[in-house]
Amino acid sequence: LSLILILSMPIRRPQSSKSSAPLSGLSKNVFQSSSNYKDSKDMADRERLLRVLDRERELLEEARAREAQKTDEMRKAKDTADEANQAKSAFLAVISHEIRTPITGVLGMVKLLLTSQLTAVQKDYAQTIQDSGDAMLSLLNDILDYEKIESGKLDLEFISFDVKRMMQGIERLMTSHADSKGIGLVLSIEDNVPDYLVGDPTRLRQVVLNLLSNAIKFTEHGDVQIIVKKIDMGTTDTA
């Protein structure tokens, strides 16, 4: 008998390197694309951030320029206002001194007139002229003190003055003003008011004249009354 042995062995085909090459190349290309995309995105973000920073820097420079311009304009406006105030003060001082000279002469002549032989009516008229001149001088002093008032350095006087005489002079001065409107002006001084007070007669006279002028201006008919009375305020007596 003949024995024939047939051996069957699996045949391995050699793997071709060409089959794995496309896969490794594809993986490499995907990695490179992903890396390039990430780099592009980072670069775009940096560029966008740089543009934002540049814009913020431009806005900051513009704001600084506007602030500097505003500061310069305010400084120029302040300088202009200071120059105007100095010119105003100088003008008022010159005008006040120029007016003071003739008024002083008029008041001097009125004082001489009051020492002469005058009737009661003439003496009253001359006294009114003197009181009006004194009021004018007080106004001139106020003009000279205007700068002190603005700076808050105005000092009040504390001197003894005849309050009754001052109020009577104000009445004589404002009577013609009240008559021109067809209204009466009545002065009433109570008996308990002292003859002399201590204070600033110039400022008090100015305040009373201003109040009285407004009262006459806004009164259409009837009378405007000036009432001077003593008011007890603790230990201080005030009229």
Image (tube, rainbow, N blue to C red):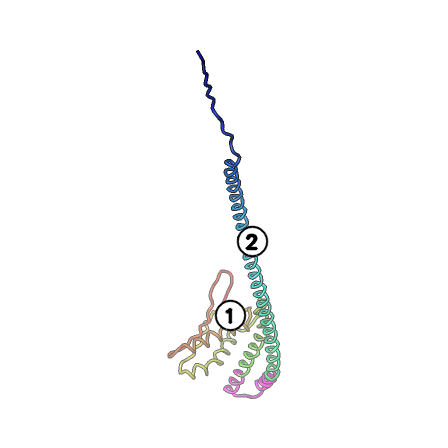
Magenta: predominant secondary structure element?
A: helix
Residue 147 or residue 227, whichever sits in front: 147
Residue 158 or residue 3, whichever sits in front: 3
* Residue 111 placement (x, y as % from top left): 59, 83
Q: Which residue bears the numbered disc 1? A: 194
User: Which sits earlier in the primary sequence, circle 2 or circle 1?
Assistant: 2
The magenta-colored residue range is: 104-128
Indicate yes or no whether the magenta region holds residue 110: yes
Q: Residue at x 55, y 69 (%)?
A: 199
Tag shown at residue 34: none
Q: Residue at x 54, y 73 (%)?
A: 162
Which amino acid lies under the numbered mark 1 shown in the image of this protein? Pro
Question: Quadrant location of residue 130?
Answer: bottom right
Q: Which residue bears the numbered disc 2? A: 50
Secondary structure category for the residue under label 1: loop
Q: Residues within 10 Å of mark 2 (few under 14, many from 20)?
A: few
Cα gap from disc 2 to disc 1, whole angstroms: 86 Å
